[in-house]
Amino acid sequence: MTDFRTIRECGETAAAEPELAHPVEVVEPSVFRSPLVLSSPHSGCAYPKSFLSASRLDPAQLRRSEDAFVDELFAGAYLSGAPLVRAIFPRAFLDANREPFELDPRMFDGRLPAHANTRSLRVAAGLGTIARLVAESQEIYARRLPVEAALRRIAAVYRPYHGALRRLTQRAQKSFGLSVLVDCHSMPSVVAGVGGAERIRTDFVLGDRYGTSCDPDLTATVEAELKRRGYTVQRNKPYAGGFITEHYGNPASNAHALQIEINRGVYMSEATFEKLPAFPKLTQDLTAVIATLSEAAQGLASWRSAAE
């Protein structure tokens, strides 16, 4: 008998992409014992055939934008009584760590909805809800996409992903008096810099939007636990948190969100997408870190309840 169950979430129009009939999975513990909710929006690797045929890139190039295996690294969250929401769809197909309609009008044939955000910095960088570029600034598409296709994609995969996050964070708020969303990501070991390629010199970057999205004691707990296990940690630079951290993190309303970025060079070959020998130990360490964070979050909930 397992201590968790996997729920497959359906999208409104996912039947149009048979590979994504169930674009989101929620790994739920048999008993909820934690105010934590884990999110892995960029670890999906189910590439629809229609998407591949519309792309000018091969699958290996498209995979450069994946947070490969991150959902596996945090899979032990259920042992702490916390659920994990993971995308089945790939980031190159749709980025759930964006506003729902951050869209570049130059990518589409037809008129975008009036509520579309066409001028964000992420859109300008080619990294909107439906990205124009993948790593190394490579153009994804050979030609413009119909606006209707973009809207179907948002309905099919974006809405069920955030529907699951809302449902679980609201349940945590109701059950524990607070929610702590942990948004799980990976970062390339080498990034483009002003003077050329630069190596990321830390194992983890914790993003709490400079203290505005998460109680500082919770961020400090994760930092201390990672350092105690021999990892190097930075805060907020170069990644302070994206849309998910900003949208679900509001400590004044007892809603906390912390982004965790893992250096891919710690656990995988970025050239071959193979796991390194360090992968099992990192998985064990992260399971322990999540357990400690869960205890700290429950302690914070108890303290706030007593103070009220």
Image: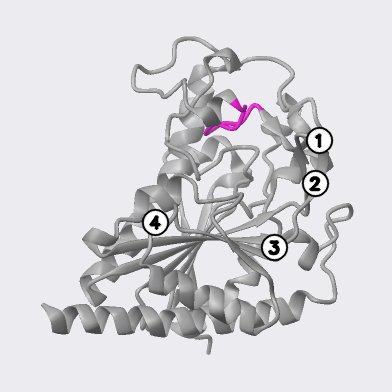
Give the percent coordinates (x, y) of residue 50: 68, 31
Q: Which residue corresponds to mark 3?
A: 69
The answer to which of marks 3 and 4 sits earlier in the sequence is: 3
Callout 2 secondary element: strand
How far is disc 3 from disc 1 in space, using C-alphas?
Answer: 31 Å
Q: Are marks 2 and 1 in contact (CB under 8 Å)?
A: yes
**Of tags 3 and 4, which is closer to the observer?**
3
Disc 4 marks a residue whose amino acid type is Ala
**Label 4: how many residues lie within 10 Å, few (<14), some (14-19) or many (20+)?**
some
The residue at the point 74 percent across, 38 percent down is 135
**Of tags 3 and 1, which is closer to the observer?**
1
Asked if residue 161 shows in the view, the reply is: no
Foreground residue among 285 and 7: 285
Callout 3 secondary element: loop
Q: Residue furthest front?
A: 195
The answer to which of marks 1 and 4 sits earlier in the sequence is: 4
Foreground residue among 250 and 37: 250
Disc 1 marks a residue whose amino acid type is Gly
Q: Which residue corresponds to mark 4?
A: 164
**Of tags 2 and 3, which is closer to the observer?**
2
**Label 2: how many residues lie within 10 Å, few (<14), some (14-19) or many (20+)?**
few
What segment is highlighted magenta in the picture?
125-132
24 relative position to 279: left or right: left
